[in-house]
Amino acid sequence: MKSKYIKRPLLPVMLACSVVMIISSCKKDFGDLNKPWDNKTYVAKIPELYNNIASGMTENGRGLFSSFLYQATQLAANYSASGYRLDNSVGGIWENYYFALADYRKTLDLIDADTAAAKMTNIKAMLTTLMAFKTLRNTTLYGNMPYSEAGKSFYGAEYYRPVYDDQSGIFTAALEDLKWSVDNFTTASDQVSMGPGETLFKNDIPTWIKFANSLRLRYALVMREKNSAAADAIIAEALTKPLLGPDDFLGTTNVAGLLIDRAGAFRGNAYVRMGSTIWEAMSSSNAEDGSGIFDLRTKIFFEPNSDGKWKPYPQNPPNGTLAETTNGTVNGKNNDPYADVRLTTWDPTGDYYYSPLNIYYVGDKTFPDLFITGAEVSFLKAEIYNRGIGGVTANPAMAEQFYEEGITSSVKFWFMLANGSSVWTVNRPAAEPTVSELNAMLSNPAVAYSATPADALKQIYKQSWIALFHQPFDAWTLQRRTGYATPNVPLASTSESLNMNRLVYPTGEISSNYDNWKTATGGTDDKAVKPWFMP
């Protein structure tokens, strides 16, 4: 229900308050409203500010990825227009970033002013790593954005409306910050520790180094098509320093008791189903019994329709495509495959013609948000050795090794996660795939590494794309930075995700920072405009 603002005339109130007999009561009634609810003064402290930033590392914008990004990346499909407006869905991500940026700048001030600042290098490097990561992610989503002057409003009014920085400069600054972190993390015993307050990686400095260096590798490849010299220098150096191994999966996994409810992003107006593009990347045929499935993750990410058949929704539905059953309760039956009741019954409570995402994948609140994984790093290495970039000589054997390592790592991770799920009761996968299952998948003609480098590169992008299924924002970046070399078909001209190359700016930003927004956009905010890093 929408709230309504009712404009009432001010004159009666003014007259009433002008009457001498009731002046005191008017002052009392209206004066109390202007008093702060709590007359306390709070002092910002480093651990609290750090954890405020860390707590904002969960992936925002779930409605975005189910309504727009799944269709854009073609990791899934929407069988109907979502009903959501893009400009009404982007504000949460934007606000999350700028609140964190302000906290970051304030925390650095506190560290610099502390007499023990020399012993807080690790804390500073942790904060710098997190903000560089958030900055690079945010700019890949929006393009140019306020950065160098942003997050400084507590310094004065001159910073209330910050100018927009070019994306190329933002990339340079954030990647330099990551390098500083990698070079300055230390295991010296005199460093100040936040103890249990460091909730992400439990003060594990080697992990922090691998995290920051792996991010350098990722984003060097993101920008390589636009600044190959700078990117190659970063790639060459990053390969000589610690990187995530195939068993490393960094995200919110270490935060005890954290629950992330994703189910709401798939209900109501989301209309998400398994799409034909990813189905064709995971199955060798359209056999409705699933006999063509060769990718071991398929039955973790998706499930059959209400009749037990594997039916993908066409990514670009032709005329005459059978419509999906109406979502919600119809004739006493709940046709929503993502209804919570299915977590206890699993059996369909209604009818739905196309294969949905697996109810356990959607409904498990313990699955972590992922920042970057060893599987992704393996695919980045495979790409580097396939292309012969970053000072590396092209080496097909090394490329194949890292390609298969990335697939194996991703498959094992999802078997482990699904097997450990407390809600997964029907068709729960084993703790890990068997050697023969993995060998069969890797030797499948659609997966086996090609001897032709150009074809092999397409395979690397495809498998990295699948491995990023749980990270749709990162899959979208991969799609765009490779010039749409990930699996895709042309989308319908009516698709809300057609030519979606960036997120539009939030309406709140337009109203509060209009002049700078207009300078950055020319007054037209178009999602089809390519951000700087795109070829």
Image (cartoon, helix red, strand yellow):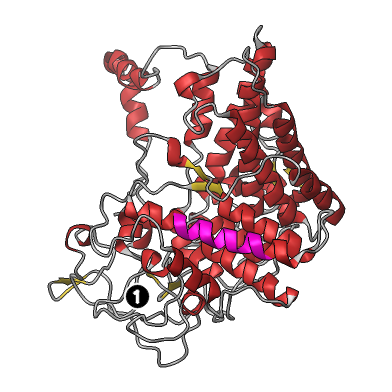
User: Residue at position x 47%, y 23% from top?
Assistant: 197
User: Residue at position x 73%, y 78% from top?
Assistant: 452
What's under tag 1, amino acid-wise?
Ser
Furthest residue toward bottom: 320
Direction from residue 437 to residue 228 in the image, left or right: right
User: Residue at position x 42%, y 12% from top?
Assistant: 40
Residue 392, percent across and down? 82, 56
Occupied quadrant, residue 300? bottom left
Depicted 155 relative to depicted 67: above or below? above
Q: Is residue 404 magenta?
A: yes
Q: Residues within 10 Å of mark 1 (few under 14, many from 20)?
A: many
**Magenta span: chief secondary structure:** helix
Highlighted range, magenta:
400-412
Relative depth, front residue between 455 and 174? 455
Residue 461, percent across and down? 63, 67
Occupied quadrant, residue 490? bottom right
- Write down the residue under mark 1: 355
